[in-house]
Image (spheres, rainbow, N blue to C red):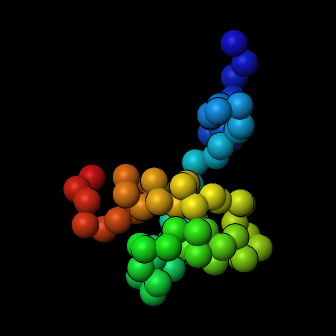
Amino acid sequence: MKEWQNSQVPHNNKLTKSWTKSEETVLIDIVSKYGTKNWIDVSRRINMLPHIKHKTSRQCRDHWLNFANPKIKK
């Protein structure tokens, strides 16, 4: 079995990386400004920034619902 580096995890034949603190901060800022109704728009705004790796709308929504939302208990 191959060891994954840089917190890469195989998922549906693709490699996904965990969210960095700066990426999470940007997600929180964008969601606070534009809301949680249109995740495609949220991912487009995140992907416009040069220091962030590509994030899909589903990745943004899942990360918000499971980790980044300040209303959830961690």
Vertical arrangement, residue 54 with respect to residue 42, above or below: above
Residue 37 in view of the camera: yes
Q: Residue at x 42, y 61 (%)?
A: 64
Instruction: Identify which residue is drawn at 46% across, 56% down.
Output: 63
Q: Position of residue 43 (x, y in %)?
A: 61, 68
Front one among 6 and 12: 12
Residue 22 visible in the shown view: no
Whether residue 52 sits left or right of residue 29 in the image: it is right
Residue 24: percent from the left, percent from the top?
Answer: 51, 65
Residue drawn at x 58%, y 48% is 18
**Whether residue 26 is situated above or below residue 60 in the rendered picture:** below
Q: Residue furthest bottom?
A: 33
The residue drawn where x is 63% and y is 78% is 45
| Residue that protrudes farthest toward the top in the picture | 1
User: Which one is nearer the viewer's eye here, 14 or 53?
Assistant: 14
| Left/right of residue 6 with respect to residue 19 in the rendered view | right
When asked about the image quadrant of residue 72, the answer is bottom left
Count of numbered marks: 0
Q: Position of residue 22 (x, y in %)?
A: 57, 68
Question: Which of 65 and 38 lies nearest the eye of the viewer?
Answer: 38
Residue 56, relative to residue 35: is it above or below? above
Horizontal relation, residue 38 to residue 2: left or right: left
Asked if 30 appears above or below 27 in the picture, the reply is: below
Q: Quadrant of the N terminus?
A: top right
* Relative image position of residue 2 (x, y in whole percent): 72, 18
Quarter of the rendering containing residue 6: top right
In which quadrant of the rendered view does residue 59 lie? bottom right
